Amino acid sequence: MYQQVPADSTYLTAIGTATTDVVIAMTKAAKPYARFTVKAEVAKETHWLSVIAFDAAVVDGARQVRQGARVDVGGRLQVRTWTGTDGKEDPYDGLPF
């Protein structure tokens, strides 16, 4: 499925391995979402991605993802850093991988 990407957004497509089973939960507004992590390797570099899907059709499809499955994900990229208990920011410390 192809979709139009807004010019002002950062879009990412990645192929990798699911490192966790999918967790299905509900937002405060009672809308379902799916969450899992993916390990993608590009040119000898490993990238760890946290995937969160809010579209109902995608959530239904994500229910089948299990740890170790090969996945192809695409969507808006949002980069965040992790602040550890020591106050230092690091994009990788504390992530559940």
Image: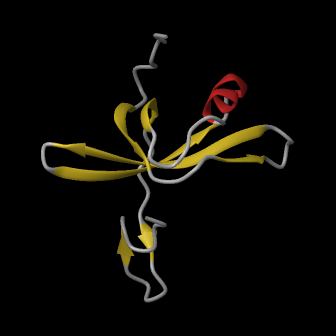
Image quadrant where residue 31 sits: top right
Chosen colour scheme: secondary structure
Vertical placement of residue 6 versus 74, above or below: above
Q: Nearer the viewer, residue 23 or 85?
A: 23
Image quadrant where residue 73 sits: top left
Give the residue displayed 38% in from the left and 32% down from the top: 10
Q: Nearer the viewer, residue 26 or 5?
A: 26
Residue positioned most to the bottom:
86
Q: Nearer the viewer, residue 95 or 85?
A: 95
Q: Quadrant of the C terminus?
A: bottom left
Vertical placement of residue 90 versus 50, above or below: below
Vertical placement of residue 4 versus 50, above or below: above
**Residue 8 image offset from top left, x and y in percent:** 42, 26
Give the residue displayed 78% in from the left and 47% down from the top: 27
How many marks can you see?
A: 0
**Residue 3 image offset from top left, x and y in percent:** 49, 12
Give the residue displayed 46% in from the left and 10% down from the top: 2
**Residue 9 image offset from top left, x and y in percent:** 43, 29
**Residue 42 image offset from top left, x and y in percent:** 20, 42
Give the residue displayed 18% in from the left and 51% down from the top: 45
Image quadrant where residue 66 sits: top right
